[in-house]
Amino acid sequence: MSLWEYANPKRFIETSGRVLPWAVGLTAVCLAVGLVWGFFFTPDDYKQGSTVKIIYIHVPAAMMAINTWIMMLVTSLIWIVRRHHVSVLAAKAAAPIGLAFTLVALATGALWGQPMWGTWWAWDPRLTSFLILALFYLGYITLWSAVENPDTAADLTSILCLVGSVFALLSRYAVNLWNQGLHQEASLSLDKEENVSDVFWQPLVICIIGFVLLFVTLVLVRTQTEIRARRLQALLARERVA
Amino acid sequence: MRALLLRDLRLAIRSGGGFGLGLAFFLILAVLVPLGVGADGRILGRIAPGILWVGALLACLLSLDRMFALDQEDGSLDLLATSPIPLEGVVAVKAAAHWLVTGLPLTLLAPGLGVLLNLAPPAYGWLVLSLLIGTPTLSMVGAFGASLTVGIKRGGLLLSLLVLPLYMPTLIFGAEVVRRGAEGMALATPLALLAAISLGAAALLPFAAAAALRVNLR
């Protein structure tokens, strides 16, 4: 029994079908608990007032925006090395989700920035690199839709994902040199003694778990859809031949 | 490989269009910006490094889509792929030819346009040096983008969507070098990073581009 058995589309659909109801339920519970707790049962910040509560959407969305790209990088590598179709279909399925997370992080950041920084947008390194990340997602998704042959598209987008990762990382550090930051430091990190105050911290962690589960759920559903679409095309092609 | 380089150079120069087009575009951009922004010399001088770099970058982009597409249409790309030269070498030569007919002339033209845009005197040397180091990356990344989109009909617009995000680090460091040069600040860091990106791109991207070409020729 090895991990690669799940690369079999049939096994993948069976297993993910069994996992999905649990994933949906847990996502709903985590997001409901985390968001309700965060929005209604935490005090207002002494400086930021109630706007601080946007953190419960902003931070998890931003984290998942980056993690989605990393997941696409890993699955693209697996496709290039081991040619498992499920892997590259998962990357294809994840891209629009990652783009959505990126846009949510940018939009909630703008909503928060308007009252706090006095501007919707600033050319801060973090903001800029997120905008660049959104462009990378757009390019990846567009390339998928532009190439007709599915295997060619899979290969080309995987190569783009690998090269794009290097350049996205370069851009991330290039913008640091280019402009001073307005954005605060990371709200949560494992190697710091002081993080966000405990009252905000606990619901935030639940929200992050909720967003991770939401991502897993969406990827599983969308990958199943992609596999079924692929089967449908194969069936149609077979019918045309017969 | 030398024959291939000479062939590409001859094609680019004799067929017209691609060769002069990028330069003309660069010139028109440098004329349009003051018309849009206003003739205030101080403002123009401040934005000149960025405008010149963005202009060079867009001018480079114009001729990218024909880099492999023309060869694919008449079948010579298949011949090149089966020739004794490795495909990586073909890509590198093609990128070098592209640089010789776009990047190099753009670099030489840039100081003249700097005069139009009231660029600060100390920045001219840095402008030429940064373009000289940076434009080969633009051609190499462009070759990668062109090899990704070679099989797609009307892939020009998609090509720019794919390539422009990849140009960002080069643009940031290149324009930073010129800006710091204009203000007389220390610029060793962005210059070294710009050179590092160029070297890295020249060393690694031919492999990625050749892989993409092989997929497209399958």
Image (tube, helix red, strand yellow):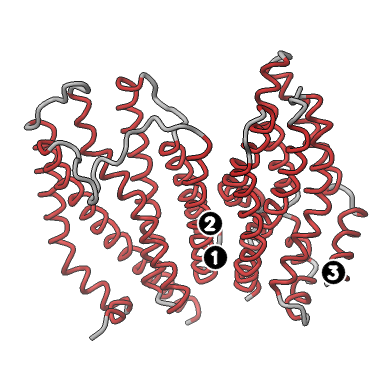
Residue A150 at x, y percent in the picture: 50, 68
Which of marks 2 and 1 precedes in the sequence?
2
Q: Is the residue marked by circle 1 packed among few (<14), some (14-19), or many (20+) residues within 10 Å?
A: many
Report the mark closest to the observer, 1 or 3.
Answer: 3
Looking at the rendering, which quadrant does residue A102 occupy?
top left
Q: Are marks 1 and 2 in contact (CB under 8 Å)?
A: yes
Q: Are marks 1 and 3 in contact (CB under 8 Å)?
A: no
State the residue at coordinates (74%, 26%).
Answer: B119
Could you tell whether B184 is left or right of A64 in the image? right
Say the numbered circle drawn on residue A143. 2
| Pointers 2 and 3 within a single chain | no
Q: CA distance from mark 1 to mark 3?
A: 26 Å
- Nearest the viewer among B63 and A223 is B63
Subunit of mark 3?
B
Amino acid type assigned to the residue bearing label 1 in the image: Leu
| Pointers 1 and 2 within a single chain | yes
- Residue A237, compared with residue A38, is above or below; it is below
Q: CA distance from mark 2 to mark 3?
A: 29 Å
- Residue A146, compared with residue B210, is above or below; it is above
Secondary structure type for disc 2? helix
Subunit of mark 2?
A
Q: CA distance from mark 1 to mark 2?
A: 8 Å
Per the image, the residue denoted by label 1 is A156
Secondary structure type for disc 3? helix
Residue B48 at x, y percent in the picture: 70, 27
Report the mark closest to the observer, 2 or 3.
Answer: 3
Subunit of mark 1?
A
